[in-house]
Image (cartoon, coloured by chain):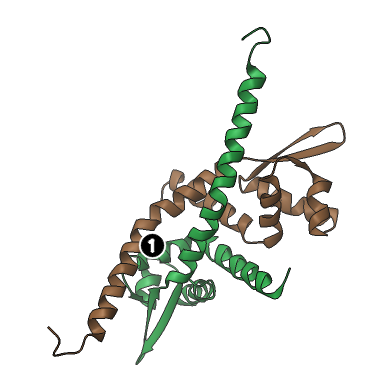
Chain colours: A brown, B green
Amino acid sequence: MNAREAAREDSLDRLFSALSDRNRRAILAQLMQGPATVSEVAEPLQIALPSALKHLAVLETGGFIRSSKEGRVRTLELREDAFRALEHWVAERQRYWHSGFDRLEAQFLSAKKPKNSP
Amino acid sequence: MNAREAAREDSLDRLFSALSDRNRRAILAQLMQGPATVSEVAEPLQIALPSALKHLAVLETGGFIRSSKEGRVRTLELREDAFRALEHWVAERQRYWHSGFDRLEAQFLSAKKPKNSP
């Protein structure tokens, strides 16, 4: 694995880790409606501020959100990067797994066919 | 959150956790070529058998693979379930995030427009 491939795998590790928690998925769902502050994000989830900040850090590292600070208020918004990378990863694999599942299904159907059928 | 929603979130947590490791993604890539034994999966990754078994357990819990044992040989193959769930999750969100990014882009472009332009 060269350095570029390793960096891509690092970034996919962080991307999927970021999505592996329901609170973080809920934060993304909220930010799809538009930018929000940290407390606006923490409140509906009924989690403490320190927990919310941890989740936001993971989402930021995963490439899903960016934050900006004006005075004492930190505002969060979605970034395209991780979503594009996720779509790309899924699309790249779709034709392989679908062709694989079709092949499996064909094997299953032919295995079930009675011996004396045409 | 009702019990059914909670179960769906549990299953998404496991699905994304399963994908958050490059060795597990490599195992899936290999199994897309067809079923393989545990040692066939462990060898190209140059990981020890106990590590391979741990990764396989996570993939099985995540709904990506199933295994069957004949004599002393355990064979692994892909399952459709997790892939379908992943596709569904991405597809459900695609229109939201794309419309969101289009809106952001429009705001950015209108903000950059000189004041005296038509």
Position of A24 relative to A70 (above/below): below
Q: In the rendering, at what x and y percent does residue B21 appear?
A: 53, 61
Q: Quadrant of the C terminus of chain A?
A: bottom left
Is B70 displayed left or right of A31 in the figure? left
Farthest residue toward the front?
Answer: B118
Horizontal and vertical percent position of residue B50: 49, 77
| Residue corresponding to mark 1 | B29
**Is residue B24 among the parts visible in the rendering?**
yes
Picture quadrant of residue B44: bottom left
Question: Does residue B48 appear in the picture of this structure?
Answer: no
**Going 45% across and 45% down the picture, which residue do you hit?**
A3
Q: Position of residue B12 (x, y in %)?
A: 59, 65
Horizontally, residue A46 falls left or right of residue B104, namely: right
Rendered residue at 38%/62% (across/down): B29
**Amino acid type, label 1:** Ala
Q: Where is residue B43 shown, x and y percent of the image?
A: 37, 70
Q: For the residue labelled by badge 1, is the local secondary structure a helix, a strand or a loop? A: helix
